[in-house]
Image (tube, rainbow, N blue to C red):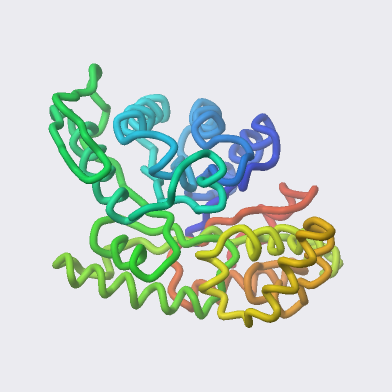
Amino acid sequence: MKRMGLAFLGEPAVPEMVKLAQYAESLGYESAWVAETRFARDGFVPAAAIAASTQKIKISTGVVNVFTRNPVILATSYATLDELSGGRVIFGVGPGSPLVLEPQGHTFTKPITRLREYLHVARGLIAGEEVNFQGEFVNVQGVKLEFTPIRPAMPIYLGVTGPKAMEFAGEAADGVLMNGFVSCNYVRRSIERLATGAKRGGRDPGEIDRAIGLVTSVDRDPDVARDRVRPFIAMYLTRFPNIVQETGYSEEYLARVREAVNKGGLEAGAKLITEEVVDDLAAAGTPEHVRQRIGEYREAGIDCPVLFVFGSNNNETIESVIGA
């Protein structure tokens, strides 16, 4: 089958994530990713459960941020997960979102600088080196892992959104996991930004794997499929300013969505998420429509769609998009 991944956006419960990952693996899916965003389930516990219950599928967080864990803990966690999985792990990391980090006491300051410093330290530790580093945000002196990682390096994918961060991914990462709730036009712009960063780093842009967390909802009734994702689109249009900026939607429309969510919650905001917005930011509808949308993202330049599956019929959804 064509390259395809499966991802979880804080749902469902961990045992169900494991079952779905096992099913995806049996169908030939390449990878399973666990988002760590908002205040839902963490990334590493479900990823470990999936690793212990599968044999071939690649495993990653999709992604964890560089504020709530330090680089030594991140490197240790990924090396441990890689050991558990037998070398199937992708190091998935990104800056996070200010509206999620600030309530936890983290100021969203110079995220790209922080990303750069974290990657430098984590790469050294996973390679088995003793790391000494004094940066703007990271200070590590004489740290070395007390076990030998099973691989001296693992692929690093950055979950980034904005122009500068995307250029940094082109400069420094093996791949990128573009955010959910973005359009095909955004993908095209991002590929140009990846190429800019790659050239700055003396790299071939074609070496950078391009994945995307594609929000997917399938039902024979297209309205049912779209209605599932409308509250989540409303959430992301009100809580994730980096994504909002890339939509290109008018401030008047975005203000109305914010006002509706503030007054009546996500269900009120969902009423303002039109069919056109759903089709712009997600793959939601009949199986035929969703396969078409996945194909459009591939045509825009995506190498591996990674599906955030929404609905009660997840097995059927995972199977219905094969070949897209």
Q: Nearer the viewer, residue 185 or 84?
A: 185
Specify the farthest residue to the top: 146
- Quadrant in which residue 238 is drawn: bottom right
- Residue under the image location 75 percent in, 73 percent down: 256
Q: Give the x, y percent position of residue 116.
A: 26, 51
Q: Is residue 161 above or below residue 44?
A: below
Quadrant the C terminus occupies? bottom right
Q: Quadrant of residue 225?
A: bottom right
Residue at 31% x, 60% y: name it. 169
Residue 155 on image: x %, y %: 31, 47
Asked which quadrant contains residue 68, the reply is: top left
Q: Is residue 1 above or below residue 23?
A: below
Q: Nearer the viewer, residue 74 or 269?
A: 269
Q: Who's the residue at 85% across and 63% down the image? A: 224
- Name the residue located 49 percent from the left edge and 47 percent from the top edge: 62
Where does the image place residue 16, in percent across and percent down from the top left?
A: 69, 35
Residue 27 position, x and y percent, is 59, 48
Report whether 247 appears left or right of 157: right
Q: Of residues 66 and 57, which is closer to you in this image?
A: 66
The residue nearer to you, when weighing 88 against 11, is 11
Q: Is residue 114 above or below residue 134?
A: below
